[in-house]
Amino acid sequence: MRLEDEQYEEIKRTVIDTFSLYGIRCIPISAFEMATKMGIKVIPYSALSEEKRNAAMRESKDGFSIGSSQSQEWIIFYNDACESYGRINQTIMHEIGHYAMGHIKDGEEEESEAKFFAKYALAPPPLIHTFIEHITPDTIRDVFDLSNQAAKNAYWYYRSWLYNGGSYYTDYEEKILELFKAEG
């Protein structure tokens, strides 16, 4: 589902504000670190009983989250038997996106927002532009510790960003570069 341009801008700002609030300043960006700093519990499927693990797999082969607005508790469950760390990290960041965006229901729009949140959070174009000399899907994968597919998606998103004036930074892009400047 294609979101409105204003929604994409809001999500980018939410990513960077979340990084700033929780002191996320290292590449590759770790969803595990971010969840820990945010007070979100992260539980692998392997830690569940066989019955609960089977139920979790029926819910999602990758992962899912549950939260309660009354207790302010959010828990992410993820399949630790997934194909790669990059895939697991993306799944957890996707679920963090639901939390950070304040989602209370689960629909197509919320899924699209969380998917974009994860894509932008794990490989923001201004950081790709600043920290990689020869930009290819492989260098993005290696520097940002992404899955092959996520690296290809990040590469094409970066190219689109660059084509649309990426070297003219927005206020939030300047903010992310400031956050990560010690990294370079």
Image (cartoon, rainbow, N blue to C red):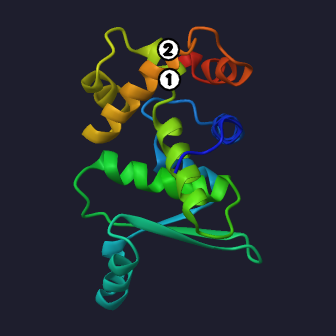
**Label 2 belongs to which residue?**
162
Return the x and y of residue 163 as percentages of the image width and height: 49, 13
Q: Secondary structure at mark 2?
A: helix
Closer to us: 153 or 80: 153
| Three-letter amino acid code of the residue under disc 1 | Pro
The mark found on residue 125 in the picture is 1
| Quarter residue 24 falls in | top right
Label 1 SS = helix
Separation of disc 2 and disc 1 at Cα?
Answer: 8 Å
User: Is 5 in front, or is 152?
Assistant: 5
Q: Is residue 44 visible?
A: yes
Residue at the image point whose x is 36% and y is 8% from the top: 133
Q: As drawn, is 184 to the left or to the right of 140? A: right
At horizontal 70% and vertical 25% (from top left) the residue drawn is 172
- Graded by Cα atoms within 10 Å as few (under 14), some (14 to 19) or many (20 or more), the crowding at tag 1 reads many
Q: Amino acid at mark 2?
A: Leu
Q: Examine the image and state in which quarter residue 28 appears.
A: top left
Residue 51 sits in which quadrant? bottom left
Q: Residue at x 56, y 44 (%)?
A: 117
Q: Residue at x 58, y 16 (%)?
A: 181
Mark earlier in primary sequence (2, 1): 1
Residue 148 location (% of width, % of height):
25, 38
The residue mark sitting in front, 2 or 1, is: 2
Considering only vertical position in the picture, is 133 above or below 47?
above
Q: Position of residue 13 (x, y in %)?
A: 70, 35
